[in-house]
């Protein structure tokens, strides 16, 4: 089939609301082509709706992409400004040191209590305690 004939048919039928009317006016169009063109024109409205929705989705996607780029830039800035890995490491070390100091203090208190119980008392002191 001739491509220019097809292009001419598309141009004729695009201006028409019904593709069949434009195809029926031409006697030289083969019936198989007429059926195929009729099918295409039948779906043309749906395809245009899908096209507009796809354009809208692409615009929304671009907006989201730009938003994510901005968020990434903010994260990079915060990372370089505050140097978060070093700050987190310093906080973890500080917590470990505080826990170690707390454990040592608890152990000292426990040892002091143990020594207090182990200290020998004179007999007369324990007898006065009983009375």
Image (cartoon, rainbow, N blue to C red):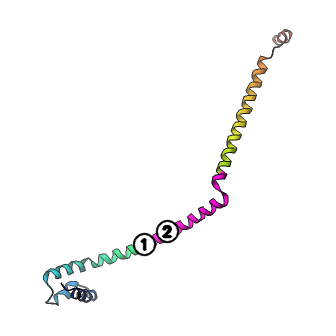
Residue 106, magenta (yes or no): no
Q: Relative to 83, is 70 on the left or the right? A: left
Q: Residue at x 19, y 79 (%)?
A: 36
Residues in magenta, as a range? 60-87
The numbered dot on residue 58 is 1
* Pick the front one: 19 or 1: 1
Above or below, 115 against 103 in this view is: above
Q: Which residue is drawn at 60% across and 64% down?
A: 74
Q: Residue at x 46, y 71 (%)?
A: 60
The numbered dot on residue 131 is none
Numbered label tally: 2
Q: Relative to 61, is 8 on the left or the right? A: left
Quadrant in the rendering for residue 37:
bottom left
Q: Relative to 126, is 24 on the left or the right? A: left
Residue 61 at x, y = what percent?
45, 69
Above or below, 87 against 78 in this view is: above
């Amino acid at each position: 089939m001739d491509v220019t004939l097809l292009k001419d048919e598309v141009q004729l039928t695009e201006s028409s609301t019904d593709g069949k009317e434009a195809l029926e006016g031409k006697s030289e169009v083969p019936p198989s082509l007429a059926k195929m063109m009729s099918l295409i024109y039948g779906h043309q409205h749906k395809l245009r709706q899908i096209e507009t929705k796809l354009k809208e989705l692409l615009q929304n996607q671009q907006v989201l992409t730009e938003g994510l780029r901005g968020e990434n830039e903010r994260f990079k800035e915060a990372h370089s400004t505050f140097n978060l890995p070093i700050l987190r490491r310093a906080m973890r070390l500080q917590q470990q040191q505080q826990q170690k100091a707390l454990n040592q203090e608890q152990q000292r208190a426990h040892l002091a209590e143990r020594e207090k119980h182990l200290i020998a008392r004179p007999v007369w002191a324990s007898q006065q305690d009983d009375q």
